Amino acid sequence: MRDIRAHIMICLMLVVSSMLCAEELVPAGITADKANRITEPMTLTVQSGSNYIRFDEERLPAVVTYTSSEAFGPIPAAMALGETIKAELVFADCGMAWRWTVERGEGDKIVEIKAHESAVINAAPYMCNTTFGDTTAVAYDSFTWYEETLTTSGDYTHVLTNAAGCDSILTLHLTIEQATCTTTFGDTTAVAYDSFTWYEETLATSGDYTHVLTNAAGCDSILTLHLTIEQATCTTTFGDTTAVVCESFRWYSQTLATSGDYTHVLMNAAGCDSIVTLHLTIEHNCGSYDTVYFCRGFNTEHEELMAGGVIRRYRPYVFESPAEWDYMEGVIVEREHDRALVDLRRAEKNLYAHYVGQLTPISSIRWSVQYDGKGQYEPLTVTNNPQWIATGHVAVQISFLCGELYNTEFPTDIDQVSQETVSIKRIENGRVVIIRGGAKYDMFGTKIQ
């Protein structure tokens, strides 16, 4: 109990301190031509009405956080280029705050903040940080690095510059060795009917065949195939299928609309037949179903008879947490001691392909990264191909159509990638609720039944 009271007193002291300090802060401009140019993180005061700040293109994306001393004040708004920026309710500095993310676009952006009270904003522009990476490689004869073929041992550097003008300086420590070849041998025995395909060659006669493979170092592997070709002795097989369907039935590339018995002959690679018989019953005026899914609370589970005899079924979406299955399969392509090659586009494809039908669909996926030694996460742009990510933690927030949120992160500098579900804070019925491990807790850690 003493610890809880101490935390409450600290929060009250921080709120009073921030209110006193606000008198010394720079006010935001009250007209667009006097908008404050934000080049580094800074805190400003805003007054009731319109307030203006400006971000250069290279300082985007940026985050603006609005904090008021009023516990339940009117909702502020933010606009850029005539469009309203979506606000996010967050818990910061021992209180609730509104946060806007100003996305990157063409040119600079002036942000208009419409307040209904005197408040404080924190403007955080995108800041460049030069990153460094080291790679050690041992190759035979030559090594290709960023489209340059290197044939001599030594240290090489390469500079990558992203769209925001931030540099990543990569260093390659290369050792070139001469390959010492040892010829290897391999044997394969095969029995086939009529013919056998081996390394794109079709063989129809029994015998021994050889094939030579040469690796990148110029070393040979000699493979021998001991092949026996036999003539297939056929035995005709039979199969029966019974089907009762509405209106028509698709069977081996033909559409059947009349009840009756139908046959189809299949031939395997050895030339042997399988005769399949279909006993088909066609029913007419049997109707069909069309299912429509909805978010719980927006409709009720029921059925309606539509034109043409179609029965429309209304069913609620079923939410399944991404933590219950491995959507990261195939995402980590390669790891080094200070970075990982990650295919985030594959993770998104895995997710979107999974959440279909009755499962609640995904509305958006947002990635961010916290590089090792940095205190804040920054937005991460997903490319169509696997991308190298330096040491740190990659976080993902998955938003679902019906309002569910899933947050998790994984490190980029260890061999075994693990996923941990992080806590989620949100407002329910006017109070802060923390969701962790599928359970709800209040601000004091007490579980909500």
Image: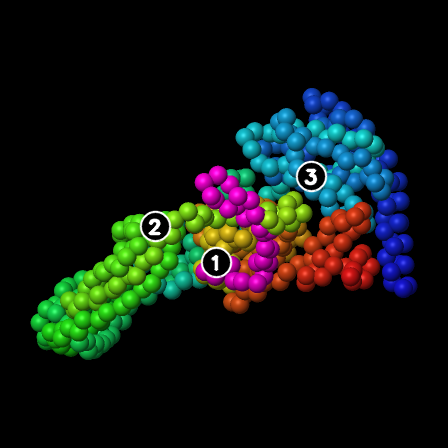
- Element under disc 3: strand
Q: Residues within 10 Å of mark 3 (few under 14, many from 20)?
A: some
Q: Amino acid at mark 1?
A: Val
Residue 285 on image: x %, y %: 42, 47
The reply to whether the C-beta atoms of the residues labelled 3 and 1 are less than 8 Å apart is no
> Which residue is labeled 1 in the image?
331
Q: For the residues carrying marks 3 and 1, which lies nearer the camera in this image?
A: 3
Q: Amino acid at mark 2?
A: Ser
Q: Is residue 181 left or right of residue 148?
A: left
The reply to whether the C-beta atoms of the residues labelled 2 and 3 are less than 8 Å apart is no
Q: For the residues carrying marks 2 and 1, which lies nearer the camera in this image?
A: 2
> Which residue is labeled 3 in the image?
87
Q: Is 320 inside the magenta-drawn segment?
A: yes
Q: Where is the C terminus found, in terms of image quarters?
A: bottom right
First in residue order: circle 2 vs circle 3: 3
Quadrant of residue 218 within the rendered picture: bottom left
Residue 83 on image: x %, y %: 63, 29
Q: Nearer the viewer, residue 146 or 369?
A: 369
First in residue order: circle 2 vs circle 1: 2
The magenta segment is 303-330
Q: CA distance from mark 3 to mark 1?
A: 31 Å
Residue 40 on image: x %, y %: 68, 39
Residue 248: assigned label: 2
Q: Is residue 413 left or right of residue 265?
A: right
Q: Residue at x 75, y 29 (%)?
A: 114
Q: Residue at x 74, y 56 (%)?
A: 434
- Element under disc 2: loop
Q: Residue at x 11, y 74 (%)?
A: 231
Q: Residue at x 13, y 68 (%)?
A: 195
Q: Is 70 inside the magenta-drawn segment?
A: no
Residue 46 on image: x %, y %: 79, 31
